[in-house]
Amino acid sequence: MKTAIAPLTHEVAPDMPAQLQEIYIEKGTPAFMRTVLALFCGGFATFALLYCVQPMMPLLSHEYSINAAQSSLILSVATGMLAFGLLITGPISDRVGRKPVMVTALFAAALCTMASAMMPSWHGVLLMRALIGLSLSGLAAVAMTYLSEEIHPHHIGLAMGLYIAGNAIGGMSGRLITGVLIDFVSWHTAMLVIGGLALIAAAVFWKILPESRNFRSRSLHPRSLLDGFTMHFRDAGLPLLFLEAFVLMGAFVTLFNYIGYRLLAEPYHMDQVFVGLLSIVYLSGIYSSAKIGALADKLGRRKVLWSTIVLMIAGLALTMFTPLVLVIIGMLIFTFGFFGAHSVASSWIGRRALKAKGQASSLYLFSYYAGSSIAGTAGGVFWHLGGWNGIGLFIGTLLLIALLVALKLAKLPLLPQNGSAT
């Protein structure tokens, strides 16, 4: 019996067996709206749960008598465990299906966030944050693969951009809510609020996301998994995209990890509420992820990726000046460029990987969150050694690497099996 996900487009060979036919979701259909709204909610919850702790870091440094690098562990342990979990949950979804893994992940992460608010010690908080990261790997590993399988190839850039827009709104809302609340209530209460919002998002996701139509179960045999990973690293472009994810996310998280320390100190001496409100710069990322994703569908990813990285470099340069207005404009441009670059690179994975797409997405996101975990904490060393100038040097180096990688990707030939992989 067919479901009411129509109209859909059949992209099949005439002699392909019916059970192997791919039925894509078209832009403008109710199914497309349900899909992007569900993934928007999933992205919102993921980034809100991950990054709600960033505005708290100076407060946690004071409460637990720890330095900035140690305080950054509240984010780094979550992203580190998320990166590790991606290597497991991606292949699991290749076996058991996309939606069950994503739904379980969202509910588990929301409940762990609420539990973290009740931990009596710093180590207990870190333990729960690690479990949150491990849980969220189930959505992060699978969402891109789900979109690449279910959405018509002509609309993947747009759909991925809208999903990443949910990431941006989640990151903004998580930072904004906790950044404002902790000036009036305890950080424990702020975490309970974020966990409750994530539970609502998980319920919406569960109810409205269409079931997979093009999913084909794959074996979890170790040999099969190894063959998939080996195939991806033999590709000329995929390892470069994995490296791109590491350096871009490392640069982005480092800036937002330590900008609060800068603005709370001289010459700004800003209130915590105002520092939290600066999360509205994420609005530029919400716009750029969808806009640049659609632009990449039209012009080609190789022509768009490097230009978004140049924008990030320009934004970073503005933050190096003292006037607050230039710092804020720099943050806006930096955020615009980052979410645009991530939208382009992540949609490129689904077009470049011809098989085992779940594993390819997992490797991309493993690199993405490993960059968050490693660079986000390493940036603390540069902060202690050189203040914001040290941070600028560190992030600038990462972005220079990202630009060189993007230029290398732009020179790669088209895939003969898939000429639209640009």
Image: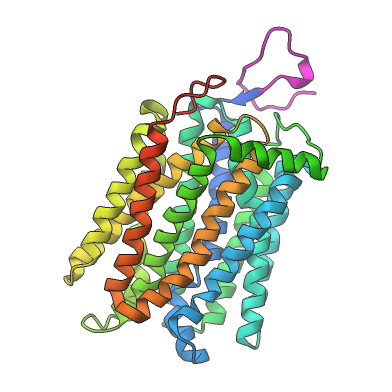
- Closer to the camera in the image, 407 or 352: 407
Magenta region, residue range: 1-22
Would residue 172 be found to the left or right of residue 271 on screen? right
**Residue at the spot 30% in from the left edge and 41% down from the top edge:** 307
Residue 300 colored magenta? no
Q: Is residue 110 above or below residue 421?
A: below
**Residue at the spot 73% in from the left edge and 8% down from the top edge:** 15
Would residue 302 be found to the left or right of residue 146 on screen? left
In which quadrant of the rendered image does the N terminus lie? top right
**Residue at the spot 23% in from the left edge and 60% down from the top edge:** 317
- Closer to the camera in the image, 258 or 7: 258
Residue 240 percent coordinates (x, y) = 48, 43
Would residue 221 be found to the left or right of residue 402 on screen? right
Colour scheme employed for the rendering of this structure: rainbow
Q: Is residue 13 above or below residue 289?
A: above
Residue 200 percent coordinates (x, y) = 62, 58
- Closer to the camera in the image, 346 or 63: 346
Q: Is residue 234 visible?
A: yes
Q: How many numbered markers are drawn?
A: 0
Residue 65 percent coordinates (x, y) = 49, 92
